[in-house]
Image (spheres, grey):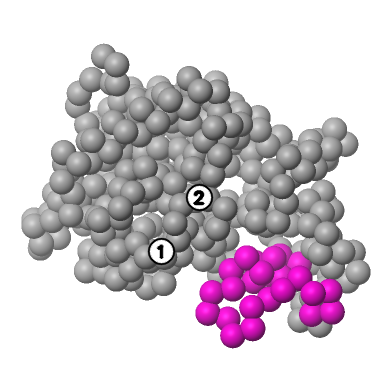
Amino acid sequence: MTAYALQKAIHDYLNPRGRPDPPTLDPDALHARYGLGEAEVRALVEADVAALYRLGVHPVLLNSFARARVPRDRYRAALAELEAGSAPTPPSGEARRG
Amino acid sequence: MAELVAAVAASHAPMLTAAPDTAEPGQRERVYAAMAALRRELEAARPDALVICSNEHFTNFFLDNFPPFCIGVGDRHVGPAEAWLRIPRGPVPGHPDLGRWLVERALAEDFDPAFSEDLCLDHGIMTVLHLLDPERRIPVVPIVQNCAVAPMPSLSRCYRLGTVLRRAIEAWPGSARVALIGAGGLSHWVGMPGMGRINAEFDRWFLDRLAAGRVEDVTALTDAEVERAGNGAHEIRSWLTVAGAVAQKRARVLAYEPITAWVTGMGVITYADGPAPGE
């Protein structure tokens, strides 16, 4: 699986405009609609910033999701933890194209 | 003939409105004072329309279709997208005639923007607009640029977009007064390790280039060189579009503050003549 489906799920969740069936973070629905695996579903439901980053979510999309779902302090702590773990810092989109 | 009556640019940052008090008070006040100066400048310029260049944050587009540029041609837009921005969500008046004219003239100059009648405006435009026209009285033509997902339009292409916009505005058959606003971050890291870091050296170099009229030094940068100031630094494209519209003019820097709490280098510039705040 590429990160495309995971990112599509995030994008749909954040941008429900005009959709008759606004997406939720229901695990069964995430699996059925997007074909997400257990790790992806768990990362989304728990709004696990570090896990989503490692799964390849584009940083700008991840930021939108985190701002909507995660307290600011927790969000920054997750990124700081990633940095302390020497997470790679890929160029925008180059390694995260979908 | 329409007239370009103002050209300005400012950093956008969600915390500018969502949590302004997190900044060190002196820094916050200097940025707000500069934004107030821009507001006064716009009020004096009496624009009939605002053309606002900012960038796409996955608000309107996704990886299935991510245009380099999209011009909003709706008779109204809606914003902000983010409920937590502490800006009332509601309609923003559009200027469909001007928007469509900009698209048509761009196409005539072999520049191929997408267009949309249904753009949702996020913090990129709404934070700056909220400080410049909080009552949303002036119709807006939003232009969203891809400053996030590679491959992005080149820096020089974004600069040239500004020259096209300038010619289009001046060729418009109406008698409108148009202000051009760039709204994009300077250095910052978004959604990745490093968030909160600011490359003030890059920011000051960039602003110095605009103030010296040496934009070619900036457009010569590669994306990798820009990224030394963070993945969010690609948003300087919106500033370059404004620079392209005013061609040889030199920017006047009204403020620059590296505000860690807002995770962004906060700059404010104008291309109008006159003293800086406090002079």
Percent x, y of residue B153: 49, 52
From the image, tell me which residue sits under label 1. Answer: B90
State how far apart marks 2 and 1 are (Cα).
Answer: 12 Å
Q: Amino acid at mark 2?
A: Arg
Within the magenta stretch, is there residue B202? Answer: no
- Residue at (53, 50) in percent of width and height: B85
Within the magenta stretch, is there residue A20? Answer: yes
- On the question of residue B77 being in view, the answer is yes
Q: Quadrant of residue B58?
A: bottom right
As drawn, B138 above or below B132:
below
- On the question of residue B228 being in view, the answer is no
Mark 1: few/some/many CA within 10 Å (<14, 14-19, 20+): few
- Residue at (73, 51) in percent of width and height: A70
Circle 2 SS class: loop
Q: Chain of mark 1?
A: B
Q: Quadrant of residue A88?
A: top right
Q: Magenta part of the protein: which range?
A: A6-29
Question: Which residue is at the front of the view, A72 or B122?
Answer: A72
Which image quarter is the C terminus of chain B in? top left
Q: Chain of mark 2?
A: B
- Residue at (51, 66) in percent of width and height: B60
From the image, tell me which residue sits under label 2. Answer: B86
Question: Which residue is at the front of the view, B271 or B167?
Answer: B271
Q: From this viewpoint, which residue is outermost toward the right? A: A38
Percent x, y of residue B94: 29, 65
Percent x, y of residue B13: 52, 41
As drawn, B151 above or below B214:
below
Drawn side of residue B137 relative to residue A75, left or right: left
